[in-house]
């Protein structure tokens, strides 16, 4: 492409103002910003935290994307209807579902097994968005650790236990689907 | 005499090395604070290694320099196959030696009075009475360029070489304003000896930063550029040149480069304080005798170190305040702004000094002129400074036209392109 190509739009550079030419006002401006941040940090308002001793402050746990959980309905059954929408939406292919015929009246299928490979997962939250019954949700648990790869593949029981552990602090969304928020 | 000098050398080198190590920690903490982070605060005394029941002491991260030093020494020291081995080893050594040697003539205090184990007062400088002190500092700081050039050349790497080229151009360009800034001070004091320059300021109580503001600005900017600190760190600029001339270095050789860089900064701070901020002098508490008592002698060292610490803090704050210059702006600043300003300062100082001698009694001028005269001279110098600054900024030599030449074909601009076609 040549410089005189009609498709190129040339933008006129803004003219350097008086303070820019003098340099000194800009100089003071830069130092002021530096001192502002310095003061903030020295008052103990640094953005980072000393992690193991101090937990990071997650402002809204409902929109944080951490470890998954499988929600339960009011009768304590798994809410999932094994529709595979989450597994289809998953860009990392980390969700593996085996659905079988449901023993209950209100749905056709339910997951016999529901496993998520937490190491493959990229925590994008697309499964949560895809789910029509709000069965899969991401919690605010961020410090996920394990001693082996096998340990990090979460099965249905483990995902349901994550729900039990987090349901008080992070209630389910969508009241229309049985949520409590 | 020899023992005295050896002790002084030990104090200077030991002090400088420790200072450089802890300034690295300080710089990292400052960087963290300015960027709203906490910074390295963990490495302290690892007492739990000695006894399971004891708790580690953090000590605000004061163990970090030791940990960094051990890391640098124990790291694999990799020499790439494509380098010029001899020059590759020589470069960090030469730069560190030159940086350390500078401190031979830079005083680190005033005078220690006679007493304890010595009969005569001890001057707190490794080589006392060096009448050409400033020249030695200049000569040795110029050698630092060779370390950079050797390092970049021996590395045989494009980034290193780009850093080297920038460095050589930059350091040569800024040596001129650096010299012009000092010239005014030398005119006013009539001596190249740093001790005498300080003594002169102590005697009149007028630091040269007040009586020669223009010279001070020129020297200050040039000292930043000579120390290759931001906003003048074009030789290294991590973001563009991945470290510039020391890209290929690792382990202890890299450490030598980094320490030398910090020494340059410390030397620049020493010079700024001694030439323009009165060295060890502070009104009412240090006096200006050439034979101080013990309390005054210690106070002088404390004042000097405090001033240097403040200047270094400023160096570190500046790093996070202003963006790096583009190379053409850097050159324009040196040749079109700093050089004229330095010359104006030189002329102004010469005129003012001459007026001082001519208007008032010559005998009086030598023994210290009246406070009123000094005040008038300082005001005149500030007026010259402000006028020169405004004139330069109206002329705007730093403003570059970056628009492409639409009236010209690319082949007209660069004939080599034509050959390629």
Image (cartoon, coloured by chain):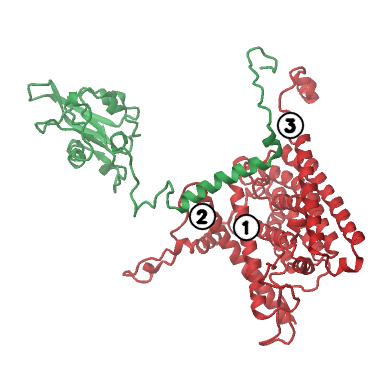
Query: Which shade is chain B?
Result: red
Q: Which residue bears the numbered disc 1?
A: B312
Direction from residue B141 to residue B241 in the image, left or right: left
| Residue A173 percent across, percent down from the top left | 23, 29
The residue at which mark 3 appears reads as B400
Q: Earlier in the sequence, mark 1 or mark 2?
A: 2
Residue B6 can be seen in this image: yes
Compared to residue B411, the image places residue A173 above or below, namely below
Label 2 secondary element:
helix
Vertical placement of residue A98 versus B59, above or below: above
Residue plotted at (71% across, 24% down): B403
Pointer 2 chain? B
Q: Which residue is mark 2?
A: B29
Distance from the alpha carbon under mark 1 to that under mark 2: 14 Å
Is residue B421 in view?
Answer: no
Disc 3 from disc 1: Cα separation: 32 Å
Label 3: chain? B
Lower sequence index among marks 3 and 1: 1
Q: Chain A takes which shade in the image?
A: green
Look at 77% across and 62% down and name the residue there.
B137
**Between B14 and B297, which is closer to the camera in this rendering?**
B297
Please state if B309 lies on the left or on the right of B203 as rendered.
Answer: left
Element class at badge 1: helix
């Amino acid at each position: 492409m040549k410089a005189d190509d009609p498709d190129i739009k040339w933008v006129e550079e803004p003219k350097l103002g008086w303070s820019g030419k003098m340099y000194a006002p800009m100089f003071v401006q830069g130092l002021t910003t530096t001192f502002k941040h310095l003061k903030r940090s020295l008052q103990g308002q640094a953005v980072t935290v000393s992690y193991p001793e101090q937990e990071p402050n997650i402002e809204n746990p409902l929109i944080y994307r951490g470890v998954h959980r499988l929600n339960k309905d009011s009768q304590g059954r798994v809410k999932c209807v094994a529709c595979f929408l989450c597994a289809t939406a998953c860009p990392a292919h980390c969700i593996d579902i085996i659905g079988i015929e449901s023993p209950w009246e209100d749905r056709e299928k339910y997951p016999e097994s529901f496993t998520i490979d937490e190491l493959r997962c990229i925590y994008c939250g697309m499964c949560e968005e895809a789910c029509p019954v709000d069965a899969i949700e991401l919690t605010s648990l961020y410090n996920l650790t394990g001693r082996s790869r096998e340990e990090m593949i979460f099965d249905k029981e483990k995902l349901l236990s994550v729900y039990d552990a987090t349901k008080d602090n992070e209630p389910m969304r969508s009241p229309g689907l049985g949520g409590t928020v | 005499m020899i023992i005295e000098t050896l002790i002084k050398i030990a104090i200077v080198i030991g002090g400088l090395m420790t200072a450089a190590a802890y300034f690295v920690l300080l710089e990292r903490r400052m960087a963290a604070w300015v960027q709203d982070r906490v910074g390295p605060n963990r490495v302290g005394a690892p007492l739990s290694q000695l006894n399971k029941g004891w708790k580690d002491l953090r000590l605000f991260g004061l163990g970090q320099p030791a940990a960094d030093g051990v890391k640098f020494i124990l790291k694999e020291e990799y020499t790439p196959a494509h380098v010029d081995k001899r020059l590759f080893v020589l470069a960090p050594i030469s730069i560190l030696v030159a940086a350390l040697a500078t401190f031979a003539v830079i005083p680190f205090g005033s005078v220690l009075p006679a007493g304890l184990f010595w009969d005569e007062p001890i001057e707190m400088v490794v080589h006392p009475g060096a009448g050409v002190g400033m020249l030695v500092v200049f000569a040795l700081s110029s050698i630092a360029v060779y370390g950079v050039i050797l390092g970049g050349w021996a590395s045989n790497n494009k980034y290193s070489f780009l850093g080297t080229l920038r460095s050589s151009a930059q350091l040569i360009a800024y040596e001129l304003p650096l010299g012009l800034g000092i010239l005014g001070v030398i005119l006013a004091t009539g001596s190249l000896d740093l001790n005498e320059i300080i003594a002169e300021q102590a005697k009149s109580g007028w630091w040269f930063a007040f009586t020669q503001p223009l010279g001070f600005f020129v020297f200050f900017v040039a000292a930043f550029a000579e120390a290759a600190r931001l906003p003048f760190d074009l030789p290294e600029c991590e973001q563009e040149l991945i470290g510039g001339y020391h890209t290929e270095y690792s382990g202890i050789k890299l450490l030598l480069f980094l320490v030398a860089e910090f020494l340059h900064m410390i030397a620049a701070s020493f010079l700024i304080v001694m030439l323009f901020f009165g060295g060890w002098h502070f009104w009412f508490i240090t006096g200006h005798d050439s034979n101080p008592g013990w309390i005054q002698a210690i106070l002088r060292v404390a004042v000097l170190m405090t001033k240097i610490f403040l200047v270094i803090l400023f160096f570190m704050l500046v790093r996070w305040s202003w963006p790096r210059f583009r190379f053409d702006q850097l050159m324009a600043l040196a040749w079109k702004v700093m050089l004229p300003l330095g010359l104006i300062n030189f002329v102004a100082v010469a005129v003012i000094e001459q007026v001082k001698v001519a208007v008032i009694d010559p005998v009086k001028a030598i023994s210290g002129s009246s406070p009123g005269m000094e005040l008038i001279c300082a005001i005149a110098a500030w007026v010259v400074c402000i006028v020169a600054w405004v004139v330069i900024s109206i002329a705007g030599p730093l403003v570059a036209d970056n628009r492409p030449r639409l009236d010209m074909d690319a082949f007209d601009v660069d004939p080599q392109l034509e050959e390629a076609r």
